[in-house]
Amino acid sequence: MILTLRIWRQKHARDKGRFETYEMKGVSPDMSFLEMLDVLSDSLVDRGEDALTFDNDCREGICGMCSLTINGVPHGPDQGGTVCQLHMRRYKEGDTITIEPWRVSPFPVLKDLAVDRSAFDRIIQAGGYITTNAGSAVDANAILVPRADAETAMDAAACIGCGACAASCPNGSAMLFVAAKVSHLAHLPQGAPERAQRVLSMVSQMDQEGFGNCTNHSECEAVCPKEINVSHIAKINREFIRAAVKSIF
Amino acid sequence: MKQIAHWYLSSIGAKLVMAVTGVLLFGFVLGHMTGNLLMFAGPDAMNAYAHFLQEKGMLLLAVRAGLLAIFAVHIASAIRVHRQNRAARPEPYAVSSYLVTTYAARTIFVSGLIVLAFVIYHLLHYTLGVTNPEFLRMLDPQGRRDVYGMVITGFTNRAVALSYIVAMLLLSSHLSHGLTSLFQTLGLHGPKFKPLVNKVGPAVAIVIFIGFASIPLAVLSGRLN
Amino acid sequence: MKLDAKIPSGPMAGKWEKRKFEGKLVNPSNKRKYNIIVVGSGLAGGGAAASLGELGYNVDCFCFQDSSRRAHSIAAQGGINAAKNYQNDGDSVYRLFYDTVKGGDFRSREANVHRLAEVSAAIIDQCVAMGVPFAREYGGTLANRSFGGAQVSRTFYARGQTGQQLLLGVYSALSRQIGAGQVRMHPRTEMLDLVVVDGHAKGIVTRDLITGKIESWAADAVVLATGGYGPVFYLSTNAVGNNVTAAYRAHKKGALFANPCYTQIHPTCIPLSGDHQSKLTLMSESLRNDGRIWVPKKQGDTRTPGDIPDAERDYYLERMYPSFGNLAPRDISSRAAKRACDEGRGVGPGRLGVYLDFRDALSRLGDDTIRQRYDNLFDMYERITGENAYNMPMRIYPAIHYTMGGLWVDYDLMSNVPGLYVLGEANFSDHGANRLGASALMQGLADGCFVIPYTIAEYLAGTAPGEVGTDHDEFKKSQNEVSDRIRALLSVNGKRSATSFHRELGLLMWEKCGMARNEAGLKSALEMIPALREEFWENVKVTGSGNDLNSELERAGRVADFLEFGELLVTDAITREESCGGHFREEYQTEEGEAMRDDENFSFVGAWEYTGETPILHKENLEFEEVHLAVRSYK
């Protein structure tokens, strides 16, 4: 296949950045999208140009590191998958593909297509945990968790922290990410003692990081590689109301 | 108090305020529409209803002040949320392609602003009589204010009628997203609920549009005179 | 050098208790005076950083990824073993210990394995307390499944994402410590050297991957938890960023590297599709419960699988291992697949693949049942290959998956360099020559959360805190070496990308030192690797500069280390003249083609010392007091 790639190139965080167009020949339908970029990057190096920078690691859709917006859609056209799971047989001869980094203010571009997602780490540091020191736990079966709750918690816990939710949101909101963590822990009895404080702290940190507000577009759910449902956002809203009311009385 | 201000300023708090004030405003819209539909019951019913409201005096004033305050809070929150959202997402993608969001959702701020402009005009037009002072002097045979006649006269002007219909279209668009959205914001949402809730907004919006737009349409087509 | 494993005396079951009691302690109010460096943030590293932070130590934790939540522990699918005996099916600490020693083909250290089995129960308790959403029964108790041929159900799991859920549990514990200021996290920072002062590990030198800044970090102890070296084969199921650099730099600074030739090959991976390929994807082993593995009987049979009648198919695992059949252990089924392909009976592009056929299961159980059991795997397969496994058999081939070798450590998980601890896949201690399924997660958490917090105190108690600062000459020397090397990489300005060298090395390693090894092949590898390394330093092309985010430079540095480490791996493989676990020497097999161990001459840990020239082998003899040496048989 021959494809035309329009790729965002940006030397560093302060550089303005621009699109570069590359003609890509000999693309095999069996290549993954990132392997196609590997080949492009290698050919740039051969020509003495700067290699293409893009975050990636596990290449099997679980580490959450890859982060490309392809033709306006974070993680590209396949539902329920990351960019690294996307294969070139999805495209046809002569296609033009526009590749951009995540575009949301709290994720500044570092170089080319790589962004800084440490904002997500700080949100978790603000309360996305259960306080328990190693060695202090009771026997695992002493805590009974109804199967349905465990399953719902797992649905939310499947989040890989890639940031596609915020990147896809017309408002740049990180609500699905924060909601997934709050909902995961709120569905488990272990998470109960810190339930109220957790949601207040995490939402407060999310706001400080400069994410936008959720206005229920549901784009996040549509692009989420783990197909996390927006009903978890309803859950975090409930948790917030509950915590706010509780702290008054 | 400080804590409450803190919640209000948080992103979820701001949206809760939007949702609650939105529900109240929707209540007003619903009441207003029901009242308006008395037009179809004839001049007497309409004017009697208007008279009944105006007799309330202080109470009417208090309700109006309350509504105004709710409206102001709704708008102020909207502006703040909108500005934060623009700041979080200053740069659009070169290729824009949304998957599921609706036109109504993406334009809710703009539709809100236009509805606001319409409301101001609407108040100047019918309630305060600034644009048409003669409306306030119209009386019916019983000596009550002739609201019925005022509406007929107003909508006989095609431009006024058309702008009214357009405004109602935007209000419906605003409500179609807002009414669905508020369930989610208030946490009244879950997988089982979702298909139903997603239909509530658009369905109610259509009813509201028909309810309001039927009056100018009836006037224009000569069914009401 | 005499290798002292410092195994506590006394009966096996009491060794860990005894060690915990006899070990020195650091007074709670003194703990904050000690600085500890942890490199790596997976289950072992993240667990260690969090647990040491909880105890009150000052911790600096480093990872090369953009967040500590990305470590490759996250990719483990199947589950985590623990001797809880919740199923009342006869499991016990002793049985888990026994299975692990036997599964490791009698090349692991008994005392370490026993401790692993002992702490396994506490790991599950801790993970549940941290909010890991393990699978549950309707009554709310934890669910278990059996795994990797074990005869008891002792594997805890969270759908097919157990590694992810455990890592996120550790990540949340670590995040709490970072939030509390007890741990300082340094993401996108790569360790490029270990600093040793007067024989003791006293810090590291790192490169900030965003600014390129070379920095020194001093500490009272250094903990390495930097994972395995699978990507020395270029293609593996590992993340593409996984590398041996941190461990290898420590090796060059004196830490012994033990058993590098023990590499685990996983039988059910999606085969190679072309030269562009950057990684191999693992398909859960559970597929072998319902899929039948076969190749055509005829060589070079190019018919589509559906056109090959049963009489002309060779269901070779069922034929060779009638009792285990398609569920034969990883090493055995991997080698059988290789043999079939070597005979010219492989299938698919490149003829490097065998069929995993669900035809019979689909007709027996129906599409719906198979969909329920494996739908996500069938989806994943289709995403990658474009083929629908409901209509045609999957193609699978073995791939490098895990490395049992690693830096040598004693019972306390301290290397031969005092103050340097090595945890998880980066050390060598628990899996011997072969790792059992669902044991990697167990070891990572055991080392990080339940071993190092006790054993590190012994060393720290004998050390004055903050003795050495980054102003020490050794730090300056090390920093200069690191900077010089980066300049050297950037200044070669040759014609080939680092990746092309990596790919060539990987292919060489796979062919000469992969699933099956022989002396002639290994010897030729020992000639080819130095030649390739030489070419690398003359002809590599690294674009960009050293002062910013430069993935080419990062890659080149890692490939340069693989080019040295590969030679060590081959040297170890040539020295070990026996077949055991993941190390199969063709000269040492039974008439039926099974691995032949040589317990008399090779029942030792081979720990290599770096000299700059030929490495020196040190042997730690393995003694088996509890588990009796026996031949593994799966016939």
Image (cartoon, rainbow, N blue to C red):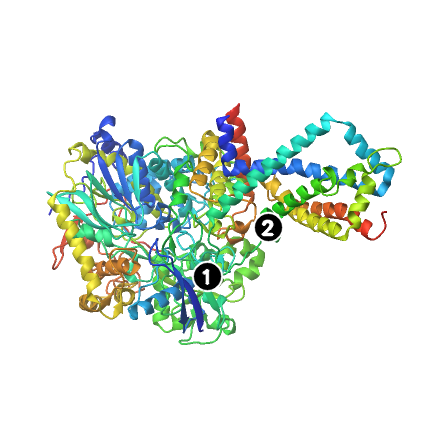
User: Element under label 1?
Assistant: loop
- Mark nearest the camera among 1 and 2 is 2
**Residue B149: x %, y % from top left:** 83, 42
Q: Is residue C506 above or below residue B174?
A: below
Q: Is residue C401 above or below residue C8?
A: below
**Residue A63: x %, y % from top left:** 40, 51
How packed is label 2: few (under 14 Cα within 10 Å), some, or many (20 or more)?
A: some
Parent chain of label 2 = B
Residue that carries the numbered disc 2 in the rendered image: B107
Which mark is drawn over residue A86? 1
- Amino acid on which the number 1 mark rests in the picture: Leu
- Amino acid on which the number 2 mark rests in the picture: Thr
Give the camera-side residue of C158 and B37.
Answer: B37
Q: Is residue C366 visible?
A: no
Parent chain of label 1 = A
Residue farthest to the right?
B141
**Residue A158: x %, y % from top left:** 47, 47
